[in-house]
Image: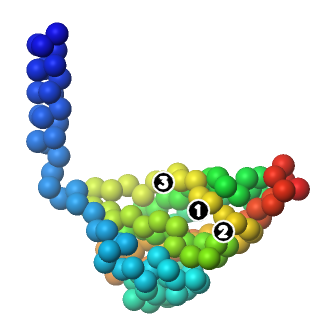
Amino acid sequence: MERRKFLGFGIVAAAAALVPGTLSAEDYRKTKPAVWTAHTVDDAIAKMYGTNKTIEQGVTLTAPDVAANGGAVPVDFSSDIAAKSVAVFQDANPEATVCAFTLNENSIIDFSIKIKMKQSGTLTVVVEGKDGKLYSAKKSLSVALGGCEG
């Protein structure tokens, strides 16, 4: 039994040694706190990236037209753009920012998340390209307030 524990620990230690030090992510809640309290999507994007001007191309956003459960709205987004970061915003809840991810040079933008939406609204995904441009996609959806889509 002790041999198994030792081998298991050795495998975990070897795997940890192989993880590069460049996997550190920026903590946007500490570095950009105003992003998380912004009440409009345009304001949140401007506070995150310094501008709210985006190019609506290069990002694919998929969400249901009608979400039967506003507590768990499935959202999928992807892009082939070489990017520094990606962020998701919505205009249905009091705070507009949903999440933000720092990306490294080997990151693949292909995410599936579930978000909570208080009411019907519009989702916006913004990808910050390594070229300094902001690319985006938008999708409006209805939330069935009574459940069962009605």
Residue projecting furthest to the right? 150
Amino acid, disc 1: Leu
Evaluate if marks 1 and 2 touch, with contact meaning CB atoms under 8 Å apart. yes
> Which circle marks residue 46 in the picture?
none
Residue 41, compared with residue 101, is above or below; it is below
Mark 2 near mark 3, Cβ–Cβ under 8 Å? Answer: no
Rendering colour mode: rainbow
Q: Secondary structure at mark 3?
A: strand
Alpha-carbon span between mark 1 and mark 3: 10 Å
Which residue in the protein does label 2 denote?
139
Q: Quadrant of residue 115?
A: bottom right
Secondary structure under tag 1 reads strand
Compare marks 1 and 3 and give the one earlier in the sequence: 1
- Toward the viewer: 78 or 98? 98
| Residue under the image location 18 percent in, 59 percent down | 22
Q: Which residue is mark 3?
A: 111
Where does the image place residue 20, in percent across and percent down from the top left? 15, 51
Which residue: 14% across, 27% down? 9
For this view, does 106 lie left or right of residue 43?
Answer: left
- Badge 2 or badge 3: first in the primary sequence: 3
CB under 8 Å between discs 1 and 3: no
**Residue 14 image position (x, y, % from top left):** 11, 34
Q: Residues within 10 Å of mark 3 (few under 14, many from 20)?
A: few
Residue 50, placed above or below residue 17: below
- Would you name the residue on which mark 1 appears? 61
With 27 as the anchor, is 54 left or right in this view? right
Q: Quadrant of residue 64?
A: bottom right
The C terminus lies in which quarter of the figure? Answer: bottom right
Q: Is residue 3 visible?
A: yes
- Residue type, mark 3 in image: Phe
Question: Residue 103 at what x, y percent from top left?
Answer: 32, 63
